[in-house]
Amino acid sequence: MSKGLFDAIRIIGSGLRGQRLKLDVVARNLANSETTRTAEGTPYRRQRALFQETLDRSRGRLQRLRVTHSGADGGLTRTHEAHLSASSRRIGRAAHGVMTEVGTALDASEFRVVYDPGHPDADAEGYVLMPNVNAIEEMVDMITASRAYEANISAVQAAKDMFLQALKI
């Protein structure tokens, strides 16, 4: 029984880490929502937190990817199983069930174009490329990540309560 409990807490912990990363990404996006020039010379490009879920091979199932990750060009592509196996070794394997890998990817959507001839980064016609960050979308992501984090905390508490009840028997 304790193996199942610790596996549950390990899986919940991966969810907590994922939601924390998502909150960090939202904070980074909001902090850079007006950054028109990065080290690459382009406006800040919005980042997204991505979750990969794989089934454990020990249960006789193939690992498969549910979510995509970022390609070299910043676009989203399917992850090849070989890459997924390498990333599985980095994070560690769950003994049973699912294992979660969390990462970030650049959002490939277009930059906003704003007319501001007085801006130092304006082109000859007075237009400035602004980051592709939408504050409303970021706030929605923040609320969903916060609620998912709270749900994971409740799941840990429920698992602890079940373990304590089992010890009383």
Image: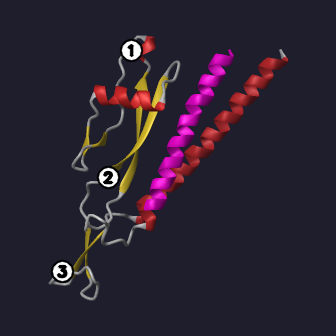
* Identity of the residue drawn at 49% across and 48% down: 21
Q: The magenta stretch spans which residues? A: 1-28
Q: Main secondary structure of the magenta part?
A: helix
- Relative to 127, 150 lies left or right: right
Write down the residue under mark 2.
Answer: 106
Q: Is residue 135 above or below residue 167?
A: below
Q: Judge by depth and name the residue closer to the eye, 39 or 151.
A: 39
- Mark earlier in primary sequence (1, 3): 1
Q: Assign the N terminus to one quadrant of the image.
A: top right
Q: Are marks 3 and 2 in contact (CB under 8 Å)?
A: no
Whole-percent x, y for residue 50 in the image: 39, 43
Task: Residue type at mark 1: give it.
Answer: Arg
Give the percent coordinates (x, y) of residue 57: 41, 16
Q: Quadrant of the C terminus?
A: top right
The residue that appears at 31% across and 64% down in the rendered structure is 132
Sequence-earlier tag: 3 or 2: 2
Q: How is the image coloured?
A: secondary structure
Neighbor class of circle 1 (other Cα within 10 Å; few <14, some 14-19, many 20+) is few
Which amino acid type is shown beneath numbered disc 2?
Leu
Judging by the rendered image, the residue that carries numbered circle 1 is: 61
Q: Residues within 10 Å of mark 2 (few under 14, many from 20)?
A: some
Q: Are marks 2 and 1 in contact (CB under 8 Å)?
A: no
- What distance separates the C-alpha of mark 3 from that of mark 2? 24 Å
Residue at the extreme top: 60
Looking at the image, is 10 positioned above or below residue 136? above
Between residue 147 and residue 2, name the one nearer to us: 2
The amino acid sitting under disc 3 is Asp
Q: What SS does tag 1 mark?
A: loop
How many discs appear? 3
Residue at image x 81%, y 19%? 167
Would you name the residue on which mark 3 appears?
123
State the image coordinates of residue 22 (x, y, percent, origin top left).
48, 49
